Image (cartoon, coloured by chain):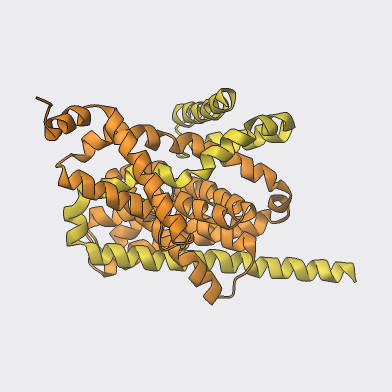
Amino acid sequence: MPTPLSEIWVYLAAQPLLGLTLTLVAYQVAQAIHRRARYSPLANPVAIAVAMLVTLLTLTHTSYRTYFEGAQFVHFMLGPATVALAMPLYDQRRTLQRLLWPLLVALGVGVATALVSVVVIARLLGASRETILSLAPKSVTAPVAMGISEKIGGYPSLTAVVVVLTGIFGAIVAKPVLDALRLRDVVARGFAIGVAAHGIGTARAFQVSEEMGAFAGLAMGLSALLTALVAPALVPPLVGWMGVR
Amino acid sequence: MIGALATLLGFQLAGEVIAFGLHLPIPGPVLGMAMLLGYLAVDAGAAARLRDTSAGVLKHLSLLFVPAGVGIMQHAGRIGAEWLPITVALAASSVLSIAATAATIAWFKRRLDAQDADAAQ
């Protein structure tokens, strides 16, 4: 008699193979849907893949920890991918030299706006202290944001989730927001997406053009750097000043 | 490809070691990226060797965020209880920072272009 399907699932769920395969397959399917939707930002492949995986794991009563045993191999690649962003930057070195100061000032403006506005708005709407601290580094790429969150007293795993949500939202709204403000410059658009929506925004920018992607990648790297430097000094006092205990 | 991957991991490793060893608040991979950029500036041949592999990794950057995103199932309770401040703060803050960043660059670029036009006359 063949082994029942549920037992096969239990056997497979105990090893990394299943989580890894499911992640890649879900992403392939999400990519296909994204293509069918003619690359509409609304059909964001990360959002679709996450929704499919959460549904499947919930229906099969599989824990996130079990899933992550396999998915960690994909998660791990965030590190080398961050290093690889040096390549598109190297290709844009001329523009980078010409616009160095404007980009650095814009970086400061963007990072300060992202940090302060999310803390103030979340506080005004009654979020708890741990939630506010977990939300603060939301615009920064996942591994860095998790480190910042831990340092200032948030929940790193909640931060990972809000980082992905922010990236998806930023990738969707960047075009309408920038169009409405009549900001058409490719460098400004790419850089803004990278500051506000890290790697998911950068992936979106690369779909538009190499140049936009390169500046989004630059912004993502620099904002990770700057946020890591200023958030621990800025966020806890701001939260305290707003009277959150 | 293996050589290129080893180079990327090597720079990440160097970044992690330096950041940890010197207690820098900078994340290791970001430091690794900065060091690789400096290295490419002195060894142009390295760019040719790394190009295909880094393009391949960056082409599927979105995929790498999927495992962290699935973590939403661990926080269903908190997100359910605080969904309003979380969603509104994320959305409004993202729109504000996109607009502020792009507007700053556009303002500088208009000034730079005007200077270039003056210089050309």
Chain B rendered in what hue?
Answer: yellow
Classify B66 as above or below A186. above
Q: Please, is residue A111 above or below residue B41 in the view?
A: below
* Residue A136 in sight here: no
Q: Nearer the viewer, residue B119 or B33?
A: B33
Q: Give the percent coordinates (x, y) of residue B65.
A: 39, 45
Given residues B58 and B24, the one toward you in this image is: B58
**Residue found at x 22% / y 34%:** A66
A164 horizontally vs A229: left or right: left
Give how far across and how far down residue A24 sits, in percent: 37, 39
Residue B93 location (% of width, % of height): 40, 65
Drawn side of residue A26 relative to residue A194, left or right: left
Residue drawn at x 31%, y 39% as measured from the top left: A22
Residue reaching furthest front?
A1
Tell me if residue A243 comes above or below residue B22 in the rendering.
Answer: below
Q: Is residue A212 left or right of residue B109?
A: left
Residue A10 appears in which quarter of the rendering? Answer: top left
Which tint was used for chain A? Answer: orange
The number of numbered badges drawn on the structure is 0
- Outermost residue to the right: B121
Front in this rendered view, residue A168 or B94: A168
Quadrant of the image containing the C terminus of chain A: bottom left
Whether residue A35 is visible here, answered yes or no, is yes
> Which residue corresponds to the image point at 55% horizontal and 38% vertical from the top-left?
B56
Residue A213 position within the rendered picture, expressed as x and y whole percent measured from the top left: 58, 52
Q: Quadrant for the N terminus of chain A, please.
A: top left
Query: Would you identify the image quadrant in which residue A13 lies?
Result: top left
Q: What residue lies at 59% left-to-right and 75% top-to-bottom?
A: A182
